[in-house]
Amino acid sequence: MRKLSAQFMSDLVDSNGVLQPILTRVKKDHTLMLAIRENFINIYYRGGNILNLKEHNKGFYQASFDDQYNKSGLLIPGSPTVINNQNDSRSWIDSFPIRKNIMDEYFSTYGKAEREFQQLIARENNNSTISNESEYFVSDIEVTEPYARFDIMAIRWLAAQRKNGSNCKVALIEMKYGDRALRGSAGLLKHLKDMEKLVSNKDSYAKLLETMESQFNQLDELGLLKFNKGTSNAKVKLNADEKPEVIFILANHNPRSPKLKTILSDPEIDKYAQSQLFDLKFYVASFAGYGLHAKCMIPLVEFRKLL
């Protein structure tokens, strides 16, 4: 399960925790995103991994940066590969500007726009000036499960129902950036087939929901979710028997292209729109931006009318 140990959480949150400077930096720098994995975290910058921190049972943390980003051969700071104290953490923080520059150069040639926008969606809805108004909170990005790979796991928690964590609903989101991503091995139809396999496998799906609950609650404990829970302090509880939403976010579709309309006219897509396993929805922005609200999620029949 993608979850951090009590010691890992303590080292991030406590004022004397060895990783506390890194968490503080993430909170102050909205170009960074902390993602919870199984006994490790990834710190993302523009959708790429600027820092991987893995817990070892001997009481230290292994820190690494993916050298593949340094295609230009720039000088990489000699930050410690093992973090034992706050000074080690600060050494990594001090190196972030240079590592960002290295990654910027890499992305200028090997762009990953879809991943960058995934991180933007997470920031807008989890920790921004409008996140309290959002109704979807991102627990993870770049999700790989036994039966499916998709971009975003989110929890729908309607603004009027924040007193009870049991009112939450699962949202499994796939983002497509540009029309070239609509077909092929990672196209819309392939994604729907994979989602059907994932949700229909009761054991795998139940474990996925446990992961989402844990990630959401730990992100909340870390202070990385900015929303008003009132006085209830409710914890998220997901129900595996309730149909999840499967949502497509189609960024920068070319309105002059017939490709999307053609794909959505396929009778096989209609089959998934009537699925008993999930509710198929399409995101339509509230004028502009990526704030996710229940009213922005529309069914296939209504979405077709916009094309």
Image (tube, grey):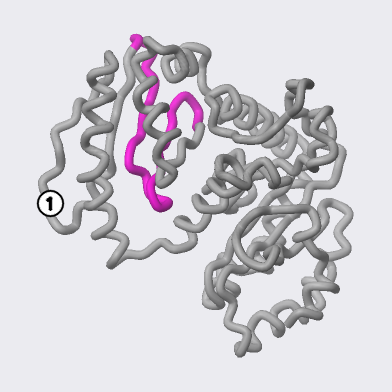
| Visible residue check, residue 207 | no
Q: Residue at x 83, y 30 (%)?
A: 166
Classify mark 1: residues with Cα within 10 Å, few (<14), some (14-19) or many (20+): few
The x and y percentages for residue 236 are 74, 29
The x and y percentages for residue 241 are 86, 38
| Visible residue check, residue 126 | yes
Whether residue 204 sits left or right of residue 68 in the image: it is right
Above or below 18: residue 212: below
Predominant secondary structure, magenta span: strand
Name the amino acid, label 1: Leu
Looking at the rendering, which quadrant does residue 8 occupy?
top left
Q: Which residue is mark 1?
A: 74
Element type at marker 1?
loop
Whether residue 148 sits left or right of residue 277 in the image: it is left
Q: Residue at x 47, y 24 (%)?
A: 39
Magenta segment boundaries in residue numbering: 37-59
In which quadrant is the C terminus drawn? bottom right
Whether residue 190 sits left or right of residue 115 in the image: it is right
Above or below 121: residue 261: below
Q: Which of 53/100 is in front?
A: 100
Q: Which of 172/293 is in front?
A: 293
Magenta span contains residue 90: no
The x and y percentages for residue 173 are 65, 54
Q: Residue at x 50, y 50 (%)?
A: 119
Q: Residue at x 61, y 88 (%)?
A: 257
In which quadrant is the N terminus drawn? top right
Above or below 150: residue 239: above
Whether residue 130 sits left or right of residue 164 in the image: it is left
Residue closest to the far front: 129
The x and y percentages for residue 201 are 75, 42
